[in-house]
Image (cartoon, rainbow, N blue to C red):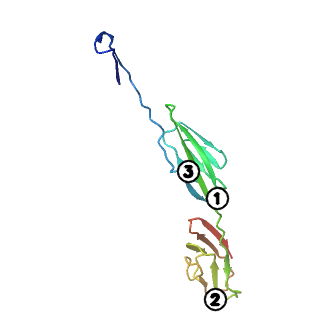
Amino acid sequence: YKVEISGDSESQACKLTRQILVTVLDRPNWNTAGGFELCNGEQKLVPFNGVAALACTPDQGIEIDNHNIIFKPTATTSYSVVGTADNGCEVSQEIAVNVLPKFNPVAEIDHSACLGNEFQLTVTEGETYLWTPQTAHISSTTIRNPIIQGTDVVETYSVTVTDKDGCLGTSSI
């Protein structure tokens, strides 16, 4: 920048010119858009690019790893994150982490199952299903209520269900 200071128009003898160098420092560059959702029991790694130091309050339910924060709260929490660049510039942001309720599906048999007879399994409603083990006796491993064809083997069936929020739950029968 060039700054020029002068007196009145008749007196040009009082004119002073100076150049001033202004350096604009880079700020850390990150944005988490205010927050996100997590399934209960899950964690999320969020990178904070351009920071030399990170601070987060509260410090429960997080892990600071280099230039990242691993969020793993057990309940919905609002965090205040401050990132400092090597040049001393700071950026702060509030991050709300909404912890979704734990999804606990329940698997059941539609009636008493007798060895050698056909029976049906069912589970709490969800979006997707994956039953195990994948044997020749199960009609489908990806539906809510598969039929088990007659077998003389006692088997434990487990199912992983994804709910409407994308959270996983498991049950066995």
Query: Compared to 81, does 22 lie above or below?
Result: above
Which label number is shown at residue 45? Answer: 3
**Earlier residue among tags 3 and 2:** 3
Front position in the image: 4 or 55: 4
* 1 to the left or right of 112: left
Total labels drawn: 3
The answer for how far apart the CA atoms under marks 1 and 3 are is: 14 Å
For label 3, count other residues whose C-alpha is less than 10 Å away and answer few (under 14), some (14-19) or many (20+): some
* 143 to the left or right of 26: right
Quadrant containing the N terminus is top left
Which label number is shown at residue 118? Answer: 2
Residue 68 screen position, x and y as percent = 55, 45
Residue 27 screen position, x and y as percent = 47, 37
Q: Look at discs 3 and 2 and give the one toward the viewer.
A: 3
Front position in the image: 71 or 35: 35
Amino acid carrying mark 1 in the image: Gly
The answer for how far apart the CA atoms under marks 3 and 2 are is: 46 Å
**Observer able to see residue 65:** no
Amino acid carrying mark 2 in the image: Glu
**Observer able to see residue 60:** yes
Front position in the image: 72 or 136: 72
Residue 89 screen position, x and y as percent = 50, 34
Residue holding disc 1: 41
Residue drawn where x is 51% and y is 31% of the image? 88
Residue drawn where x is 48% and y is 44% of the image? 30
Circles 1, 2 touching at the beta carbon (< 8 Å): no
Residue 127 screen position, x and y as percent = 55, 72
